[in-house]
Image: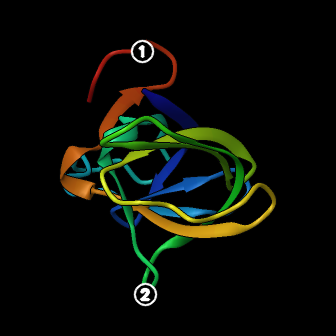
Amino acid sequence: MNFLKGHLQGGRFVTAGGLSLPVANAPAASNGQPVVYGIRPEHFILDDTNGLPAEVGVVEPTGSETQVFAKLGGTDVVGVFRERVDAKPGQQISVTPDPRLVHLFDEQTGLRL
């Protein structure tokens, strides 16, 4: 699972660097709460229209899937895609996490919210 640290603001997750990621069900009264945003590699979506820029480090075709190791907002992440990814190291792809499949954890206790 990919883990990003930040806080909740206005129903979205915001990293220390200002990257804003979608959350389907943010807990009530959670503005400013420090959380860890968890997203599994297979729950990233290639999205050229509304996606966030991710700088590609490695593209690893594995048969029916392609693993992409990248930096999203300065954090190392891994995405697994069923479609071909033609990007080369150093190039950018646009991805978005599926907000319905995001996991939020309390930063201090590690418990799922």
Residue 103, image quadrant: top left
Q: Please give the label number shown on residue 52.
A: none
Q: Residue 101's spot in the image, x, y percent?
A: 22, 45
Residue 27 image position (x, y, % from top left): 23, 45
**Label 1: element kind:** loop
| Residue position for label 2 | 49
Q: Is residue 57 left or right of residue 41?
A: right
Point 77% across, 55% down: residue: 89
Marks 2 and 1: in contact by CB < 8 Å?
Answer: no
Question: Which quadrant, please, contains the C terminus?
Answer: top left
Q: Position of residue 23 (x, y in %)?
A: 30, 56
Q: Which residue is mark 1?
A: 110
Which residue is painted at 53% across and 65% down in the image? 20
Query: Label 2 neighbourhood size at 10 Å, few (<14), some (14-19), many (20+)?
Result: few
Q: Is residue 20 above or below residue 67?
A: below
Dot 1 or dot 2: first in sequence order is 2
Q: Nearer the viewer, residue 82 or 21?
A: 82
Furthest toward the front, the residue is 63
Q: Residue at 22% across / 50% down in the picture?
A: 28
Residue drawn at (36%, 35%) of the image: 40
